[in-house]
């Protein structure tokens, strides 16, 4: 069990998470675009600027 | 095929919490009383995700803050916590707020999301979620990090310091109690500053 000030089990660093950005380009199943405001949907976009801390 | 192999190449990475994206395209009317009456009425949940892969699948297909038409708020909150003062989990909480030039906002928003979903905060359980507020050209964009127990000063200061560190931010920022914001609106003063 986690407490306020203890580490949780599923911790992922920023660099770790960024590794998966390029692999997940398709909308997930169950994402109904017709229910989503049009102004929000970009299609495939450049997902992020190069991490400047690297 | 290539897309198929990408999908099957790995097992999804579960997140510690489920998170929900919310979007609110705000009314352009400037009348204050009207704004008060309609606030939150256009807010809708977009998607709830629970894995690293689901996060990117949505994030990669929606506009980032700099491309959203102002005024709009985009939220990422833990599942079952609504991004509203009235939510029982948020009611006694507060928020840290940073302001940004638009071109700087996208990376800071992404890094805020990654720090939250990756459980990088020592007091992660105190976090409700984050909101990026996209405003017109003459007003800066803002990112706010909402927390649960505003009176827990040690937790709020830890979260604030870590957040600034994650964003490589040197700007002074303040923490406002929701309770003060409800009573005093823009007259609410920072209770903590770092």
Image: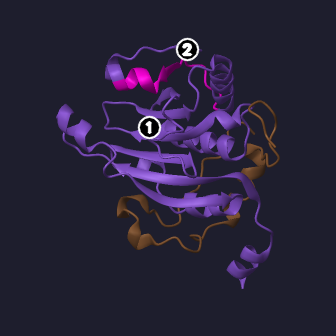
**Picture layout, residue B70 above or below residue B187:** below
Q: Residue at x 44, y 63 (%)?
A: A41
Task: Residue B168: give x, y in percent of width and height.
Answer: 65, 28
In this rendering, position of residue B133 left or right of residue B19: left
Q: Chain of mark 1?
A: B
Image quarter of the N terminus of chain A: top right
Q: Which chain, by letter, is brown?
A: A
In this rendering, position of residue B178 left or right of residue B59: left
Q: Which chain, by letter, is purple?
A: B
Magenta residues, start to end: B167-182
User: In this figure, which residue is indicated by the disc labeled 2?
Assistant: B192
Task: Residue B123: give x, y in percent of width and height.
Answer: 71, 31
Q: Residue at x 69, y 62 (%)?
A: B53
In this rendering, position of residue B67 left or right of residue B106: left
User: In this figure, which residue is indicated by the disc labeled 1?
Assistant: B102
In this orientation, which residue lies closer to the viewer: A49 or B87? B87
Extreme residue in the front direction: B88
Q: Is the residue at mark 2 from the same chain as the one at mark 1?
A: yes
In this orientation, which residue lies closer to the viewer: B52 or B16? B16
Residue B81 part of the magenta segment? no
Q: Using the rendered image of the protein, determine whether residue B41 is visible from the camera's viewpoint.
A: yes
Q: Residue at x 44, y 71 (%)?
A: A33
Residue B178 part of the magenta segment? yes
Q: Chain of mark 2?
A: B
- Going from N to C along the chain, the mark reached first, 2 or 1, is 1
| Category of crowding for the residue at label 2, using alpha-carbon neighbours closer than 10 angstroms: few (below 14), some (14–19), many (at least 20) | some
Task: Residue B108: give x, y in percent of width and height.
Answer: 57, 38
| Category of crowding for the residue at label 1, using alpha-carbon neighbours closer than 10 angstroms: few (below 14), some (14–19), many (at least 20) | some
């Amino acid at each position: 069990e986690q407490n306020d000030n203890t580490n949780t089990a599923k911790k992922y660093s920023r660099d770790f998470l960024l590794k998966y950005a390029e692999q997940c380009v398709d909308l997930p199943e169950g994402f109904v675009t017709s229910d989503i405001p049009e102004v929000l949907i970009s299609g495939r976009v450049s997902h992020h600027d190069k991490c400047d801390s690297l | 095929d290539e897309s198929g192999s990408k999908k099957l190449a790995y097992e999804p990475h579960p997140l510690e919490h489920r998170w929900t994206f919310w979007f609110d395209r705000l009314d352009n009317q400037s009348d204050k009383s009207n704004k008060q009456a309609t606030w939150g009425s256009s807010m809708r949940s977009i998607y709830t995700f629970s894995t690293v892969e689901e996060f990117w699948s949505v994030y990669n297909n929606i506009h980032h803050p700099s491309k959203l038409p102002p005024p709009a708020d985009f939220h990422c909150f833990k599942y079952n916590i609504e991004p509203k003062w009235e939510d029982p989990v948020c009611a006694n909480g507060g928020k840290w707020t940073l302001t940004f030039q638009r071109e700087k906002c996208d990376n800071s928003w992404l890094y805020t999301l990654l720090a939250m979903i990756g459980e990088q905060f020592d007091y992660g359980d105190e976090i409700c979620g984050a909101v990026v507020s996209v405003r017109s050209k003459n007003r800066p964009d803002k990112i706010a990090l909402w927390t649960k127990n505003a009176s827990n000063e040690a937790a709020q200061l830890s979260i604030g310091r870590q957040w600034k560190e994650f964003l490589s931010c040197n700007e002074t920022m303040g923490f406002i109690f929701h309770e003060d914001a409800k009573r005093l609106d823009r007259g609410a003063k920072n209770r903590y500053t770092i």
